[in-house]
Each structure stands twice: as C-alpha cells, then as structure tokens.
Amino acid sequence: MKRILTGDRPTGRLHLGHFVGSLKNRVKLQDEYDQFVMLADVQALTDNFDNPQKVRDSIKEVTLDYLSVGIDPQKTTIFIQSQIPQIAELTVFYMNLVTVARLYRNPTVKEEMKQKGIEENVTLGFLAYPVSQAADITFCKADLVPVGADQVPMIEQTREIVRKFNSIYGQILVEPEPLVGDFPRLVGTDGQAKMSKSLNNAIFLADSSEEVEKKVMDMYTDPKRIKPTDLGTVEGNPVFIYLDAFTTETDKHKLDDFKSRYKEGKVGDVEVKQYLVKVLNNFLDPIREKRKEYENQPHLIEKILKEGTKKAIAEAEKTMKEVKIAMKIDYFYHDKHQ
Ligand code: ATP
Ligand code: MG
C-alpha cells in the first residue's frame, strides 16, 4: 500500500478552502492508501512562537475538524509533529543540503514573508520551514502528498533534498509526488486569491449557520456591478466559485439558471447570496453534527492523538536507523543490535 503524508498548521480552525483543497481528497484516499495526517505544530510555531496557547488550542480544534468531515482514525494515522523527535533530527541533517539562497527563492516562502511583513527580519526558523517540511514528508517515506496549490513549491523543495541526500548517502529516502485537489486554491470571502486562517477571509467548517449567513452577505462579488439589472460576471466571482464548489449534483441546474440570470442582469446579488447561504449550510449541517458528537468526548480525542503519534514514532525510528547508518553516525548500533 502506498503511503500518504499531509497535514495542517494548528493556527486556527479549518475552513472551506481546506475542505475542497485537501480534506475531501483525504477522506477518499484513506481507503486506498496508508495515510498519515500531521498536526504541524512545530511549523505553526515558526510564525506563532509568541502565541503558544493558540497553537495548543488549535490542535484540538483541527482534530475535531478532521473527525467531523470523516477522516477515520481507524484508517488514517493522526499525529502531532512536535512529538516526533526524529523530524527535528532530520531537519538538521537536511539543512546541509539546501542553500539559503534557494530558500529565499521559494515562491511560497517569498509570498508569505511579504504577506506577514517579515521580509527584512525573517527568522531562521521561518525561512527553514520548507526544510522541516521535507523531514515531515520523508520520515515516513511518503509517496504522495495531497496539498493545495500553495504547497507545490514545498514538495519540489523536498524532492530536491531527497535527490541530493540519496545521491550522497545512497537510496534511502522516497521522492514524493504532490497531489492537488479539485480546487487547488479557493478564494477568500474578500476576493483575495486564497482563503486563509491568517487573512480573516475564511468560512470555517465549525461556523454556525448565522456566522455563515453574515460572512456570505458581506462577501465580495462583481465590483463592476452596482444594480441588479447590470450585466454580471460569473467567472472569478467568489460567490459563484463557492457555488461551483458546493452545489450538489442534483442542484446543478439551479446553479446554471442563477448563472445565466446573473450574466443577463436578471437577478440581484442578494438573492444569489441567499442561495449560497442555503447551499453552504446544507453542506455544513452534517459536519456540525458530527463535530458536536466528538466535542463531548475529549478523552477519545486524546486517545486518537496518542495512538497516532505512537505509530508515527515507530515509522520514524525505522527511517532514522537507516539514515544514521547511511550517514555513518551509527556509532553504537552494533552494541545494541548485533
Ligand atoms: P495559515 O494561514 O496559518 O498558513 P492556511 O489557511 O494556509 O493557514 P495551512 O494549514 O497552511 O492553512 O494549509 C493546510 C493545507 O490546506 C495545505 O495543503 C494548503 O495548501 C491547503 N489550503 C489552505 N488554504 C487553502 C485554500 N484556500 N484552497 C485550497 N487549499 C488550501
Ligand atoms: Mg498556510
């Protein structure tokens, strides 16, 4: 069985972008693959080191998000990054295989530094997070990494590290492939290119129906359209992008009707938005219900995370042994193992 590794930064609850970009795929893939899903708390701390409580609280929230969308702990190993010391060890070894200039050129790192206003005073930890991500992916020898579009450069960086490592130390590591979902980059409610926890433009899986309504009614639509009789643009309009993503097969004809009326100036933004509220709440209702079930069982959540982490450590130990032998730092192995 091929292996998958994916994960999320525990920096807040997960949103619709995560669902279409990655969670939906994970639910499907857990039947065909040996799937590992990581709560990337070490990575979250790279730009949230001064807010550890947020990261801590988000571990529980994100786990609830996973379980509520149908990630099944019987099929998927859910674990916490900071509890796998081998990831930190591998990161240090991989640092020798990457230049600082290459990290500065990484388009995602570049964009995030700009977004966070840290281009001039970026920490070593933040700049190096793609190296740590290579350790996340390789400690369990993942073949596939389902991600959103913003993470594709990270996988490329990992592939380079793997090739360099293997060319020097021998064929130990596996070169992973990215797997991008149907919606590699869902726009934000403000029309910004990416819905993101950190940009205040997200609809969260745990939002109440009232919160969804408020966010949708405030959404950015076609800026050129002032009156309902103005001809509207459907392409690139966040309201229609969300409708495309969340309308069920059986309601597709209704959506097509809205689209043609919008283009002809025969329907107002308010009516389309009200329809989107309904579509999103229909999608979110069963997720909310499942979340409630798990929320009442904190011990179960802890047990799931503990068991998943234990399984991940066992994988990490196997890989680390091979890595240390290959790197000739297996000084005391013969004492213990022969
Ligand atoms: P942060 O702002 O803290 O970075 P985030 O919203 O970008 O949070 P991450 O935890 O960094 O979320 O991303 C987890 C996964 O979800 C990644 O594979 C990422 O590519 C994917 N993802 C995040 N946002 C979107 C989006 N808007 N559309 C599609 N995929 C997304
Ligand atoms: Mg991110």
Image (cartoon, rainbow, N blue to C red):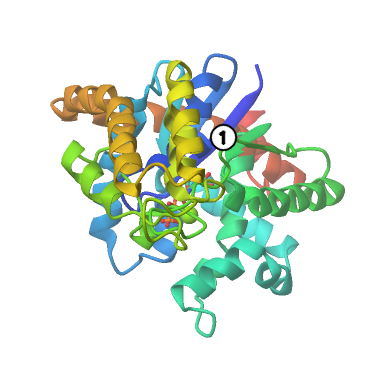
The residue depicted at 48 percent of the width and 22 percent of the height is: 253
User: Which quarter of the figure has residue 5?
Assistant: top right
Q: Residue at x 35, y 51 (%)?
A: 202
63 or 94: which is nearer to us?
A: 63
- Which residue is the site of mark 1? 5
Q: Amino acid at mark 1?
A: Leu
Along the viewing direction, whichever of 279 and 71 lies nearer the viewer: 279
Q: Quadrant of residue 68?
A: top left
Left/right placement of residue 179 relative to residue 202 reads right
- 112 versus 64 height, above or below: below
Point 43% across, 25% down: residue: 254
The residue lying furthest to the right in this view is 167
Q: Position of residue 28 (x, y in %)?
A: 52, 20
Residue 188: image location, x then y, percent? 42, 53
Numbered circles on residues, count: 1
The correct choice, above or below, for 298 with respect to 158 in the image is above
Residue found farthest to the left: 296
Q: Is residue 214 above or below residue 173?
A: below
Q: Quadrant of the N terminus?
A: top right
